[in-house]
Each structure stands twice: as C-alpha cells, then as structure tokens.
Image (cartoon, rainbow, N blue to C red):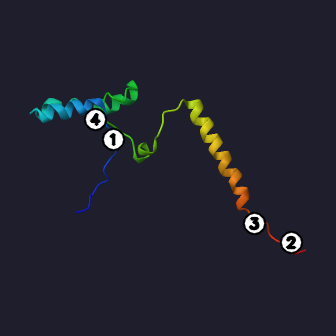
Amino acid sequence: MPLRYPVPRTHVACVVDIALALRSSGAKFEDVRDLVSGQRGREVYTRGDPDHGIWTAGIVMGLIKDILTCEELLRRIEREAEEVIGGMAARVVPAKAKL
C-alpha cells in the first residue's frame, strides 16, 4: 500500500539516540515524550543546537560532503558559476551570415 503522506526527512540528533536506548530498555512513550516532542524540535532553531531535538532537513542533506565557512561556500558557488558560464560559450554554434 503506498504512503498517503510524504515521510519527512530528519536529522538524527543525540536526543533521538537517548530516546531509542530508553525505549529499548523498556521505557514507555510517556518516559521519552519530552525528548522527542515538537517543542524540542522548535527550540533547535532558537538555541542553535542541532542535538537538542529532532528537526527536518530535507533530501539535500544527503548531498552535503563537507562543512565550509560562509566565505568558503560563497567562493565555491562563485567559482562553480563562473565555470558553468564559461562552458556555455563553448556550446554556442555561430550562425552563418545570410547577407
């Protein structure tokens, strides 16, 4: 049976590991509810701590291969854009003049 709703992709935080360990040792959901609540997930954004709770990431997270500073990231984007634009000129086929 196909899924009726899209499955969100989430970052696996330390708090998730703790909750899973507690559950596997017999804890009930009520015992881990505060660890996996949406409130903790919202606090991830205000605290800036990705391990504080569960947060959505999207499929692009799988494409991240390295962690760059903002300056390095922008320089890379600029360099790659210049390479793409430079490569476009090679694909242009000049038309023969009909004068």
Q: Circle 3 sits on which residue?
A: 93
For the point 71% across and 51% down, which residue is it? Answer: 86
Q: Amino acid at mark 4?
A: Gly
Quick check: can you spot residue 89? yes
**Amino acid type of disc 2?**
Ala
Q: Could you give the CA–CA distance between mark 1 and mark 3, rounded to whole angstroms? A: 46 Å
Within 10 Å of the Cα at label 1, are there few (<14), some (14-19), or many (20+) other Cα atoms?
Answer: few
Give the position of the C terminus as an image quadrant. bottom right
Name the residue type under label 3.
Val
Cα distance in 3D space between marks 1 and 4: 12 Å
Residue 29 in view in this figure: no
Q: Earlier in the sequence, mark 4 or mark 2?
A: 4
Distance from the alpha carbon under mark 2 to that under mark 3:
12 Å
Up the image or down, 92 lies above or below 19; here it is below
Residue 31 horizontal/vertical position (percent): 14, 29
The residue under label 1 is which amino acid type?
Answer: Thr
The residue at which mark 1 appears reads as 10
Tag 1 or tag 2, which sits nearer the N-term? 1
